[in-house]
């Protein structure tokens, strides 16, 4: 994805870790697998800030996603390769994308998982 913040995670390749340190990328606040789908795994990634990215090596490695931002309230083009930042409050209302392996359902599950973990930490 070009996200250097991932260089701080255990097991990150040494080259990625070095780039993350050199560019002063922040360590993710949360990164974990929360469920497995039929065709893909679903991860929770909570960044400390907007993330630190490297540019795409070539235009062919990017998708023009600017038109998507008009379709979702609060969406913004991310500096990653063909990615869009979408506030969770808006993402859970993206019903046309439900067919993408249950995208909206997975987003709701991720948010619920984070809230359950926070509640358990507060109790404990």
Image (cartoon, rainbow, N blue to C red):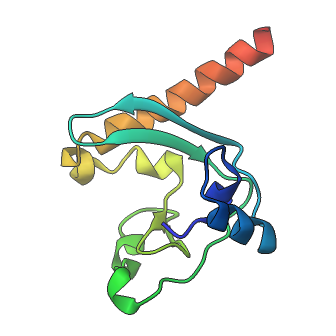
For residue 4, side relative to residue 84 (left or right): right
Q: Nearer the viewer, residue 54 or 89?
A: 54
- Is residue 32 shown above or below 90? above
For the point 79% across and 8% down, the residue is 124
Position of residue 26 measured from the top left corner of the image (x, y, whole percent): 77, 58
Q: Residue 49 is drawn in which quadrant? A: bottom right
Position of residue 76 measured from the top left corner of the image (x, y, whole percent): 52, 71
- Is residue 107 shown above or below 52? above
Position of residue 79 measured from the top left corner of the image (x, y, whole percent): 56, 76
- Is residue 87 shown above or below 121? below
Position of residue 68 measured from the top left corner of the image (x, y, whole percent): 35, 72
For the point 75% across and 17% down, the residue is 121
Q: Residue 119 is drawn in which quadrant? A: top right
- Residue that protrudes farthest toward the bottom in the picture: 59
For residue 54, side relative to residue 103 (left or right): right
Q: How many marks?
A: 0
Q: Is residue 64 visible from the viewing direction of this image?
A: no
For residue 33, side relative to residue 15 (left or right): left
């Amino acid at each position: 994805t070009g996200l250097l913040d991932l260089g701080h995670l255990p097991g990150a390749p040494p080259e990625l870790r070095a780039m993350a340190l050199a560019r002063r990328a922040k360590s993710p606040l949360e990164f974990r697998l929360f469920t497995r789908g039929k065709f893909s795994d679903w991860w929770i990634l909570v960044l400390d800030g907007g993330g630190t990215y490297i540019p795409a090596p070539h235009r062919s490695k990017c998708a023009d996603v600017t038109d998507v931002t008009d379709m979702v309230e609060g969406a913004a083009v991310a500096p990653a390769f063909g990615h869009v930042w979408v506030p969770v409050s808006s993402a859970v209302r993206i019903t046309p994308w439900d067919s993408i392996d249950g995208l909206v359902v997975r987003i709701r599950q991720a948010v619920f998982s984070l809230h359950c973990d926070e509640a358990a930490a507060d109790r404990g």
